[in-house]
Every structure is written in structure tokens, then in C-alpha cells.
Image: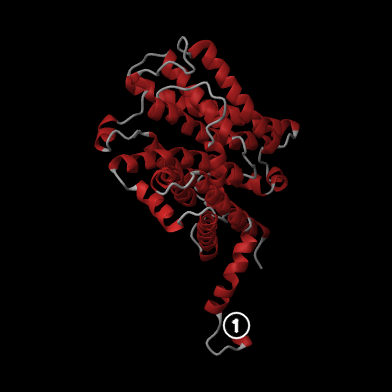
């Protein structure tokens, strides 16, 4: 019989196996069921689903520009997906990635507009500023959780709206151009745009944030599973009482976890300013990347490679919906139905497993059909 320590370490190691049969089949089946649901909705509306899906996926590779813009749409979803997943891996549910994303935009805008430095200092500083702003915004949620016992779901939802209107206030008061509903342009020295690559991709908005996003996927894995800090973060998430008994500072770990999660989302917001638009608007609604990050995290199973693949799927569906609208005359809302259906089937994995059960039974059925063989 294994010792309690070995059992505990084994529990902490769960999730490191990313592509087991059971963990990978459920998302794949959920995606298929989501696409089928979308096809049924299209048929009910009098549209041809084959033409619609052909237009959607064709849009993604139609030209170098479309390929570049697809990559651009995928990048922020990687950041917000990592943000939600990191918190979840440490026992927290980060609904506030949307507000942290907006605060990341604000931090990058402030540094990009107000400072004028050499590019090799300005660009990294603006990026770090966005990460810090997002991290602080999430750290407030972690502090309320650790010191006051406030549920992070409630506080992070509220912080989303506070972040949106706080950013609007700062932009309109100190950063906006006269008569404009947006901030001033960030200095060229703060930009993360890759000019030569954008030209090669027919002026698609390519930027260095995509490379940083891929690095963050690796950092997510290394930090959680290859460092002492990651061990403590997962231990607190798995069992706070046991972690406290082992001498870990649970409150500090909760704040640290939320700060790191917020930094991921903040980086996504920073690159939207520094790499895509070059300014921040006074928005009446949040951009939605943080909420989509919840779906990306869920579909990706809160694993780094899973999140990358889920971001590619969701970003591709979102950008490709334009092809459905223009070429097949299908409303873009149908794509949101498909995404919603995929999320539903992922969340209702019991239904998916029930659908898969007859197929798995046939696959595992012994050749002689005996019950004893199936037991062994």
C-alpha cells in the first residue's frame, strides 16, 4: 500500500499527462457534436451547412493576410486561456480575466504614451507594465480571498466592470486626444509590431506577442510542474488545510497565484495595444477575450498544449465566421452557437461519455465474448 506522501504527490502530478485517451477523446467528440449542432441550426434556417463550414475554414487559408489575421485572433486567447487555467490549477476560479485584460491594455497604454525611451527599453517595459497591471488587478481578488474570505468568483466578476470603467476614466482624463474617443498613439519605440512580417503577410497585423504567447505556454508548464513554487501552488489548490499543515503560507500563495494568472491576461491586453491597434479606446463594453479564455481553458483541459490547441480552434472559428457571412450568407451568430454548443458538451462530459460508451464497449470487448476475460 502506498504511503500518504506518495498518494499526495501522485495527486499533485495529475494533469501532467495531456493526451491520454480519456482526456483527449471527450473534447474531440464535443467539438464534433458542436459542429453537428451548428449544422442543424443552419438547416433549420435554410442554409447549407457544408457550404457554410467550407467557407469558414476556407477563410482561414484564403490568403497570407487571412492566415496572419487568424494568428492575430488566436494570440490573445492563448493568454486569457492560460490565465484562467493557471488559477484553476491552483484551486481558484478566475472569472476576472476580462478585467485583467483591460488593465493590461491600460498599463501598456500609459507607458507607451507617457514615456519616450529607446526601443530596447521602452517596448519590454510597456509589455511588463501591462503584465503588472493585470497581475495587480487579479492580486486584489486574491487578497480579498486570502484575508477576508471573499469568494473569488464574485469579486473577480465585479472587478471586470470596475476595470473597464476605471480604464475609460484614465484614458478620457489623461490620455485621450482632443475630440477623440481613444487614447493617443503609443510611441513607435513601444510598439511590438513586426513590420517586415506584416508586409510579407499582406499587411496583416503581426506582432511579437504571438512569440511571447508560445513562450508563456512553456512557462505555464515549467512553473507549475518543474519548480518548488509550482508544487506549493498546486498543493494549496489541492488541499489548503494539508498545505497549511505542511508549513506553506496559504494566503500568500493564493495572492501569488492570482497575480500570475492576472499577469498572463494582462500580457494579452498589452499586446492588443502594442502590437495590433497602437491605442486604447474608451469602450462601452469589454472586448470579450477574457470570457472566451474560460471556454479555451475548459476545452483545453487546463493543460498548456490543450489550451494552445483550443485557442487555435476558437480563434479560427471567430475569424473564419466572416467567410460564412460573406460567402455563404450565414449570420456570424451561428459560430457563437457552435462555440456555445462545444462548451455545453465539454461541461456536460457525462453526456459525451454516454454517447461514447457503446463505441468504447465494442473496442474493449474480448474476442471470446466471455465475462471473465472482460474482468481481467
The quarter of the rendered structure image containing the C terminus is bottom right
- Residue 353 in the image: above or below residue 222: below
Q: Is residue 140 visible?
A: no
Residue 191 at x, y = what percent? 36, 24
- Circle 1: element type: helix
Residue 136 at x, y = what percent? 58, 27
Image-quadrant location for residue 165: top right
- Residue 181 in the image: above or below residue 239: above
Judging by the rendered image, the residue that carries numbered circle 1 is 374
140 with respect to 315 (left or right): right
Residue 119 at x, y = what percent? 33, 21
164 with respect to 198 (left or right): right
Residue depicted at 68% across the width and 42% down the height: 247
Residue depicted at 49% across the width and 29% down the height: 131
Classify mark 1: residues with Cα within 10 Å, few (<14), some (14-19) or many (20+). few
- Residue 95 in the image: above or below residue 121: below
Amino acid at each position: 500500500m502506498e504511503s500518504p506522501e506518495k498518494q499526495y504527490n501522485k495527486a499533485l502530478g495529475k494533469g501532467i499527462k495531456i493526451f491520454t485517451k480519456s482526456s483527449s477523446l471527450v473534447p474531440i467528440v464535443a467539438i464534433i457534436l458542436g459542429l453537428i449542432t451548428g449544422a442543424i441550426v443552419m438547416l433549420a434556417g435554410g442554409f447549407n451547412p457544408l457550404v457554410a463550414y467550407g467557407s469558414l475554414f476556407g477563410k482561414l487559408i484564403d490568403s497570407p493576410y487571412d492566415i496572419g489575421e487568424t494568428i492575430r485572433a488566436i494570440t490573445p486567447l492563448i493568454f486569457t486561456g492560460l490565465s484562467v487555467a493557471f488559477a484553476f490549477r491552483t484551486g481558484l476560479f478566475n472569472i476576472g480575466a476580462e478585467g485583467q485584460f483591460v488593465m493590461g491594455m491600460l498599463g501598456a497604454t500609459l507607458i507607451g504614451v507617457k514615456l519616450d525611451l529607446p526601443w530596447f527599453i521602452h517596448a519590454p517595459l510597456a509589455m511588463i507594465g501591462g503584465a503588472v497591471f493585470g497581475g495587480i488587478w487579479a492580486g486584489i481578488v486574491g487578497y480579498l480571498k486570502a484575508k477576508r474570505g471573499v469568494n473569488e468568483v464574485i469579486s473577480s466578476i465585479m472587478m471586470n466592470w470596475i476595470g473597464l470603467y476605471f480604464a475609460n476614466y484614465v484614458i478620457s482624463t489623461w490620455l485621450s486626444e482632443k475630440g477623440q474617443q481613444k487614447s493617443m498613439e503609443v510611441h513607435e519605440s513601444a510598439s511590438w509590431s513586426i513590420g517586415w512580417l506584416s508586409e510579407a503577410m499582406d499587411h496583416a497585423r503581426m506582432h511579437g506577442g504571438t512569440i511571447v504567447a508560445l513562450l508563456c505556454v512553456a512557462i505555464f508548464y515549467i512553473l507549475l510542474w518543474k519548480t518548488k513554487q509550482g508544487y506549493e501552488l498546486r498543493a494549496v489548490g489541492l488541499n489548503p488545510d494539508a498545505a497549511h499543515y505542511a508549513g506553506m503560507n496559504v494566503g500568500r500563495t493564493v495572492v501569488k497565484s492570482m497575480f500570475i494568472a492576472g499577469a498572463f491576461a494582462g500580457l494579452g491586453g498589452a499586446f492588443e495595444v502594442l502590437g495590433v491597434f497602437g491605442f486604447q479606446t474608451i469602450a462601452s463594453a469589454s472586448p470579450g477575450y477574457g470570457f472566451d479564455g474560460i471556454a479555451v481553458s475548459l476545452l483545453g483541459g487546463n493543460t498548456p498544449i490543450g489550451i494552445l490547441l483550443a485557442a487555435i480552434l476558437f480563434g479560427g472559428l471567430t475569424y473564419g465566421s466572416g467567410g460564412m457571412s460573406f460567402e455563404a450568407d450565414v449570420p456570424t451568430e451561428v459560430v457563437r452557437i457552435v462555440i456555445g454548443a462545444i462548451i455545453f458538451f465539454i461541461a456536460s462530459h457525462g453526456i459525451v461519455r454516454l454517447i461514447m460508451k457503446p463505441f468504447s464497449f465494442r473496442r474493449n470487448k474480448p474476442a471470446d465474448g466471455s465475462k471473465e476475460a472482460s474482468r481481467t
